[in-house]
Amino acid sequence: MHELSIATRIVNLVSQVMKEHSARRVGQIRVEIGKLSCIDPASLRFCFDAVIADSNLEGAHLEITERYPRGRCRSCGSEYEVRMDDFRCKHCGSDDFEIISGSEITVTEVEVE
Amino acid sequence: MKKIDLQRKVVTESDRIAAGNRQDFERMGAYVINMVSSPGSGKTSLIEATVKALKDDVSIFVITGDLMTDNDAARVGRHGVEVSQVTTGEACHLDARMIARKLEEWRSREYDLVMIENVGNLVCPASFDLGEDIKVLLISVTEGDDKPIKYPPMVRASGALVISKTDLLPYVDGDPDTIEANALKIQPDIKTFRISCKTGEGIDQWIGWLRSQLETKRRIRDRS
């Protein structure tokens, strides 16, 4: 259900970019989904395809990459990719860490012409 | 085709409305709790125990969310506090827009404490900010000690964990120490309580903590 509002936001964003670049067609849209966002890639793709049907974005397709959360340890200073069943520092085991990414949905790149 | 580098974060309308709710709650001076759990973990019972303990000197508003019925609102309402039910129909979570509509109804009033009982669901509510100060996660001792590591986004998003139904411990394999240890692997800052609404065990610690949260909120509000 959240996937539909995310898909709509992506469409709005891409439409804006098309206007800015006077583009008529969109190809690949690269999207990164943080695993903490609870967004399912397949559902997002389904909703996106439904939203763009019969619109000027028809033919556009999402290239989705899922990103694991990244942690930064305050004890040893290292950055690490988080295991979803244990967020503690992979290097020293400390529970003094911050999560620096993992819940964002980002449109990283758009192909237009 | 030309490639355009964007690096643009997607922010939904729901996020925007939640930010608005947060501002409205600030103006109201309320400390807002979003209570989340699986269905049947004891959210309504904990709300009942809380309002019984606090209602004489704390002004409370309760919002209960369910797909159907106003049973939970009726249960809480019997204790003599203001309560409003959201029946979502089919939505498996409360969202910021539903809360915003309730805020429109009672914007001019002031409350010390707002308790929101979310729909029983450990997945979707994690990604729907309502504008609350804190998410309180309930896990009962019957649900399996590895529950926290099965639902990391919800544990990550929560500031407090209430391990509930401790009166059932003689009859189940649940171990509160293991539940807590698993939650701390995901969210080391989570504050844990162990309670039974049946026997009253642990309720004093919960109420004591809640009072200190209200006091902190009051101090911040008075300073600004």
Image (tube, coloured by chain):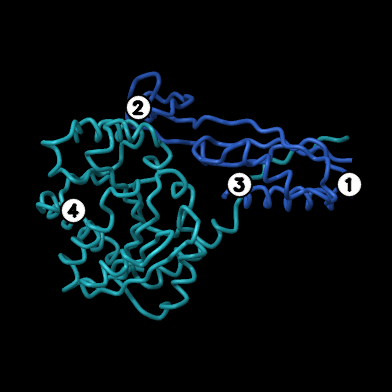
Quadrant location of residue B45?
A: bottom left
Q: Position of residue A5 (x, y in %)?
A: 62, 52
Quadrant placement of the C terminus of chain B: bottom left
Earlier in the chain: of badge 2 and badge 1, it is 1
In the orientation shown, which residue stands out farthest toward the top? Answer: A91
Q: Position of residue B8 (x, y in %)?
A: 67, 44
- Mark 3 crowdedness (10 Å alpha carbons): few <14, some 14-19, many ≥20: some
Where is residue A76 shown, x and y percent of the image?
38, 23
Depth order, front residue of B7/A43: A43
Which structural element holds mark 1? loop
Instruction: Write down which chain is painted blue.
Output: A
* In this picture, residue A14 sits left or right of residue A24: left
Q: Which residue is mark 1?
A: A23
In the image, residue A25 sits, relative to residue B178, either above or below, namely below
The alpha-carbon separation of the residues under discs 2 and 4 comes to 31 Å
Question: Which residue type does callout 4 highlight?
Answer: Trp
Q: Which residue is mark 3?
A: A3
**Image depth: mark 2 or mark 4 in front:** 4
Seen from the viewer's position, the closer of residues A26 and A70 is A26
What kind of residue is marked 1?
Answer: Ala
Q: Earlier in the sequence, mark 1 or mark 3?
A: 3
Q: Circle 4 is placed at which residue position?
A: B206
Tell me which label, 2 or 3, sits earlier in the chain. Answer: 3
Name the residue at 24% across, 43% down. Answer: B140
Q: Colour of chain B?
A: cyan
